[in-house]
Amino acid sequence: MNNASITKQEIMAVYPKVAATMADALGCDVEQVKLEASLIDDLSAESIDFLDIVFRLERAFKVKIPRGKIVEEARGDLSEAEFDKGGIVTDAGLARLKAYLSEVPAERFMAPLKSADIPRLFTTETFCKMVLRQQRAVGVTAPAA
Amino acid sequence: MNNPTVTDSGLAGSVAIVTGGSRGIGRAIVQVLAAAGMEVVFTYRENAPAAAEVAAAGPQGKVTAQATDVRDPAACAALAEKVFDRAGRIDLLVNNAGVIRDNPLSALEPADVHTVIETNVEGTFNMTRAIIPFMISRRRGKIVNVSSVSGEKGGRGQTNYAASKGAINAFTRALAVEVASRGITVNAVAPGVIETEMSRAVRELAGDQIKARILLRRYGRPEEVAHAVWFLSSRYADYITGQILHVDGGFKME
């Protein structure tokens, strides 16, 4: 379940439904929800919106998305202490995040990065990938468009 | 807008979940909300005959009993899904389920503390966590928690119960802040001494002393608490959030 195994084609297959779901949650036009849009910086999402988006995606795609899943999966086999020191993501942690969030432009990973600010990196594509990973986890092979 | 009216609470046709609805105050809440035209799903833990009685007494098909232990987060989540899948909406949550294990602190067993906190506090967390995503998504909803006079005024032999109800008050105020931007209000009612099975022991033990401290000189009735819950659930309370409404006849402490 690494990033390399998710193709652009698969992402584009779920994108319309993810974008529509996010537009509903954020009360914006679906056209604004571009694949590369940052939820917080471009779409003015607040932390409570993330809960709502994940909840709506779960229902729209009939998958379960555990809270905190993105950071947990990005961290992989790094211990929490190796990933985060005093609320700041370590160099090793930053490397993991860059690899995991490959859809986010490299220049946006600016050190020092506070762990609390990790969600600022998330884009629409991040959520497309999250849905696809969870679909695979429950054995859905063809992504529902 | 038409002329002001005080006949339409806005509750008819909407859906409520009430925890601990088979007896006492919870039962009265179920009955009052059903009378206001709501579809009410209430939980109970053990007393199936009492629960069946409450369900049967409601308008046809409008009151449903569900055996759900609020201490179990998965069971709360399952109930929320079930109600939403069937009704397509959840408008109101009343966190009423609670237990009491009174004893002076030195005589309290760890289990007495644990049981009270687990049901009263964690149960409120569990059911609210299960239901609030549905309300956030709809940008509307009301939550009413059943606290107690002891949450603020204390009472001998009630450290565990008082702590649990104080926690509910704090929970009410904090959650009100968290979800206000999503059109959800969170309030609590704080009953005083109400004529229920739960308060029977304390009423029998210290009835005269207690009544002397109640300005209205009588115990409350379950429906008097239910009417306060009805008010906080209705559209008349749309502009009220983060409040603890005391329904205690003017209860004074020493």
Image (cartoon, grey):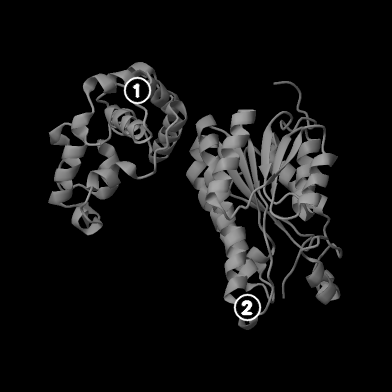
Identify the element where label 1 is drawn: loop
In this rendering, the count of numbered labels is 2
Question: Is A23 in front, or is B236?
Answer: A23
**To which chain does the residue with label 1 belong?**
A
Badge 2, how many Cα within 10 Å: few under 14, some, many 20+? some
Q: Going 72% across and 46% down the picture, which residue do you hit?
A: B229
Q: In the image, B105: left or right of A65? A: right
Where does the C terminus of chain B fall, quadrant-wise?
A: bottom right
Question: Is A65 in front, or is B92?
Answer: A65
Q: Is B59 situated above or below B27?
A: above
**To which chain does the residue with label 2 belong?**
B
Residue to which mark 1 is pinned: A143
Percent coordinates x, y for residue B12 in the rendering:
74, 30
- Decide: marks 2, 1 in contact (CB < 8 A)? no
Question: Is B125 in front, or is A49?
Answer: B125
Q: Is A71 situated above or below A24?
A: below
Residue to which mark 2 is pinned: B108
Q: In the image, B188: left or right of A42? A: right
Q: Going 27% across and 26% down the picture, which residue do you hit?
A: A37
